[in-house]
Image (spheres, helix red, strand yellow):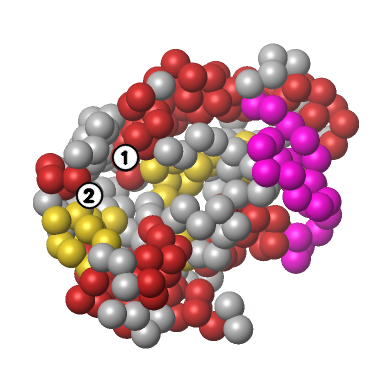
């Protein structure tokens, strides 16, 4: 197995989950980590060279620039990673007859009719969503490919950037945190996401599958659940309309993903948001 972007939250979880089944090679770009090899998605010849060296049976593409605001500010720069680099990797894998797994997002939808099923029409409203949608469409022509759409991924990570880790950094210091009260997500605990993905890959599942949490929740509800599980003060969470947050990129509001298809295809159960948070708390011990 080859996991591109193995130093990130999702990539690291995939390294652990797939590593239980056999040998795994992981790559990093900016954050070096022991046991990983350097790889730059934007380098024109790097993908083919990496595949030739590793000769994987499956490529998991978890490498990306996931910052929604950054995509809006620098669409050309982020496209070099999220679109051009990803498609170059996928093309090299297709040439080598190796299946590819790509992580997409609920941001391919506009957030007016969630929770969305896999066959719902794409209608992105920000640059990040447009980039993900473009790759999804290109993947339709790649035999054996799997698109795993996910949402609100959380878990322990060195960069501290996911939503739950931001809460855990600020609330214990008594800092208030504004949380949008008009956005729904389907929070996915990263290790649970990776365990389900292993089953989908081993079962040869292709196409698009929503791999997220068991149910959508409002962001404020999720923040309060995190405060409860980690024994933090929920009164420091300030419900705030998205329009008042001064964000450059528009966000889907009533989005969320239906995960019934993944639940039917895998034995591993997708975790409810509260279960995922509790699993995260226990994992820290």
Q: Residue at x 50, y 74 (%)?
A: 280
Pointer 2: what residue? Answer: 255
Q: Are marks 1 and 2 in contact (CB under 8 Å)?
A: yes
Tag 2, which secondary structure? loop
Q: Residue at x 39, y 43 (%)?
A: 105
For marks 1 and 2, the one nearer the N-term is 1
Q: Quadrant of residue 284?
A: bottom right
Q: Main secondary structure of the magenta part?
A: loop
Tell me, yes or no, if residue 242 can be seen here.
Answer: yes
Q: Quadrant of residue 188?
A: bottom left
Question: Residue 203, position in %: x, y?
Answer: 61, 55
Categorize mark 2 by other alpha carbons within 10 Å: few (<14), some (14-19), many (20+).
Answer: many
What is the number of the mark on residue 284?
Answer: none
Marks 1/2: CA distance? 8 Å
Q: Is residue 32 magenta?
A: yes
- Establish if 136 lies above or below 149: above
Q: In which quadrant is the C terminus drawn?
A: bottom right
Residue 68 horizontal side relative to residue 82, left or right:
left
Q: Which residues are magenta?
A: 19-41
Q: Quadrant of residue 202?
A: bottom right
């Amino acid at each position: 197995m080859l996991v591109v972007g193995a130093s990130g939250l999702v990539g690291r979880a995939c390294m652990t989950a797939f590593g239980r089944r056999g040998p795994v090679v992981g790559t990093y770009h900016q954050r070096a980590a022991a046991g990983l090899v350097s790889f730059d998605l934007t380098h024109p010849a790097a993908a083919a060279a990496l595949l030739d060296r590793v000769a994987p049976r499956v490529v998991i593409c978890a490498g990306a620039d996931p910052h929604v605001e950054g995509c809006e500010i620098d669409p050309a720069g982020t496209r070099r990673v999220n679109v051009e680099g990803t498609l170059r990797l996928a093309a090299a894998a297709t040439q080598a007859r190796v299946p590819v797994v790509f992580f997409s997002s609920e941001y391919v939808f506009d957030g007016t009719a969630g929770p969305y099923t896999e066959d719902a029409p794409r209608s992105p409203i920000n640059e990040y969503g447009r980039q993900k949608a473009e790759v999804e469409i290109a993947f339709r022509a790649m035999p054996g490919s799997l698109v795993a759409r996910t949402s609100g991924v959380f878990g322990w990570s060195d960069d501290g950037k996911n939503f739950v880790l931001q809460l855990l950094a600020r609330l214990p210091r008594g800092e208030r945190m504004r949380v949008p009260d008009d956005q729904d997500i389907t929070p996915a605990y990263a290790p649970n996401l990776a365990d389900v993905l292993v089953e989908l890959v081993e079962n040869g599942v292709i196409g698009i599958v929503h791999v997220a949490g068991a149910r959508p929740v409002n962001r404020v509800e999720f923040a309060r659940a995190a405060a409860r599980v980690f024994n933090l003060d929920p009164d420091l969470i300030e419900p705030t309309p998205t329009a008042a947050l001064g964000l450059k990129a528009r966000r889907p509001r009533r989005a969320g993903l239906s995960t019934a298809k993944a639940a039917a295809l895998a034995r591993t159960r997708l975790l409810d948001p509260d279960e995922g948070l509790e699993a995260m708390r226990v994992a820290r011990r």
